[in-house]
Image (tube, rainbow, N blue to C red):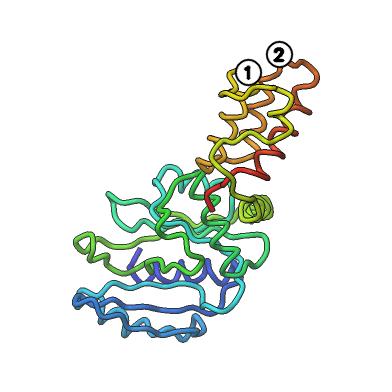
């Protein structure tokens, strides 16, 4: 497949996902950035971009800023993981170099604003990997069919374009909103109600106290609250029996209200 075919395939995939306008950026070898912003896909100056690429400029693209788009960008995703994602969801996988990770453009079920795309990116990077430094909601990705001069002139190619189900970002956005709304208190402090029941002025070394510290630590580390809750149920089931789920739910509710969770 010719280089221009890779470009055409990427843009066709974007059109199919509902993206019809884009920003094109060119970074020349001296670091100067040149922009063509908010253009229809069919009006992108690709001939000019190819001439710049021959002169060792890197070529980037993103959906035009200022609009909601049904797509989420992930940078530096391991190749095997990227292909698994595209095997399950509608996604475009771009290989930026043989030794580097892949770019994944994941189609979402509904259009997402820039802040929503940022939240979804952060949630996904924590679960499937990728570059957390590219979590911005408006990050540029490389345009397929051009050379990657950062990697010695390797071609940027479409690895896979899949037509599966669109990804539902609702869960990721709900959890991100939950994270932003929690209050900050001293690390691993026990809520007043728990402390009064335990009746101890020193460190709580009971099983419940250890589980409280474990839950807080997991949340502070950015772990998925749903997974933490499930694990807590399993930890407590032998001791609490049928009450384990109620206990885990109550513990998680208090922890989410009081622990400083990384945004």
Percent position (x, y) of residue 205? 58, 18
Query: Which type of secondary structure does the marked residue at label 1 adopt?
Result: helix
Q: Which residue is mark 2?
A: 239
Q: Label 1 neighbourhood size at 10 Å, few (<14), some (14-19), many (20+)? A: few
Marks 2 and 1: in contact by CB < 8 Å?
yes
Residue 212 sits in quarter: top right
List the single residue furthest toward the top.
Answer: 238
Query: Can you see residue 179?
Result: yes
Q: CA distance from mark 1 to mark 2?
A: 9 Å
Query: Which type of secondary structure does the marked residue at label 2 adopt?
Result: helix
- Name the N-terminal-most of marks 1 and 2: 1
Question: In the drawing, what numbered circle is on residue 10?
Answer: none
Q: Is residue 70 left or right of residue 44?
A: right
Percent position (x, y) of residue 15? 56, 72
Seen at 37% across and 78% down, the residue is: 25
Percent position (x, y) of residue 246? 78, 28
Seen at 70% across and 35% down, the residue is: 192
Q: Which residue is mark 1?
A: 207
Q: Which is more toward the observer, 217 or 50?
A: 217
- Image quarter of the N terminus: bottom left
Q: Nearer the viewer, mark 1 or mark 2?
A: 1
Q: Is residue 118 left or right of residue 5?
A: right
Seen at 37% across and 81% down, the residue is: 46
Query: Can you see residue 86?
Result: no
Percent position (x, y) of residue 73? 49, 61
The correct choice, above or below, for 17 with respect to 245 in the image is below
Query: How many dots with numbers?
Result: 2
The correct choice, above or below, for 49 with respect to 122 in the image is below
The correct choice, above or below, for 123 with respect to 214 in the image is below
């Amino acid at each position: 497949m010719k280089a221009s075919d890779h470009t055409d395939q990427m843009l066709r995939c974007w059109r199919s996902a509902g993206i019809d306008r884009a920003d094109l950026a060119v970074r020349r070898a001296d670091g100067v950035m040149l922009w063509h912003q908010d253009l229809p896909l069919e009006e992108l100056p690709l001939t000019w971009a190819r001439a710049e690429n021959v002169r060792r400029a890197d070529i980037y693209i993103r959906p035009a800023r200022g609009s909601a788009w049904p797509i989420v960008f992930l940078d530096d995703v391991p190749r095997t993981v990227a292909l698994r994602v595209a095997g399950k969801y509608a996604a475009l996988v771009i290989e930026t170099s043989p030794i580097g990770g892949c770019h994944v453009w994941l189609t979402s079920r509904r259009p997402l604003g820039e802040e929503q795309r940022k939240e979804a990116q952060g949630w996904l990077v924590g679960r499937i990997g990728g570059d957390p430094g590219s979590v911005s909601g408006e990050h540029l990705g490389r345009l397929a069919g051009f050379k990657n001069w950062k990697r010695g002139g390797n071609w940027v190619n479409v690895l896979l374009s899949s037509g599966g189900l669109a990804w539902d970002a609702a869960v990721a956005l709900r959890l991100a909103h939950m994270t932003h709304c929690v209050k900050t208190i001293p690390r691993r402090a026990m809520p007043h109600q728990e402390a009064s029941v335990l009746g101890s002025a020193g460190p709580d070394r009971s099983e419940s106290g250890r589980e409280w510290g474990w839950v807080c630590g997991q949340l502070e580390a950015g772990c998925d609250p749903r997974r933490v809750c499930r694990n807590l149920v399993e930890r407590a089931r032998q001791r609490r029996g049928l009450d384990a789920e109620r206990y885990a739910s109550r513990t998680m509710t208090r922890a989410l209200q009081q622990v400083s969770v990384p945004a």
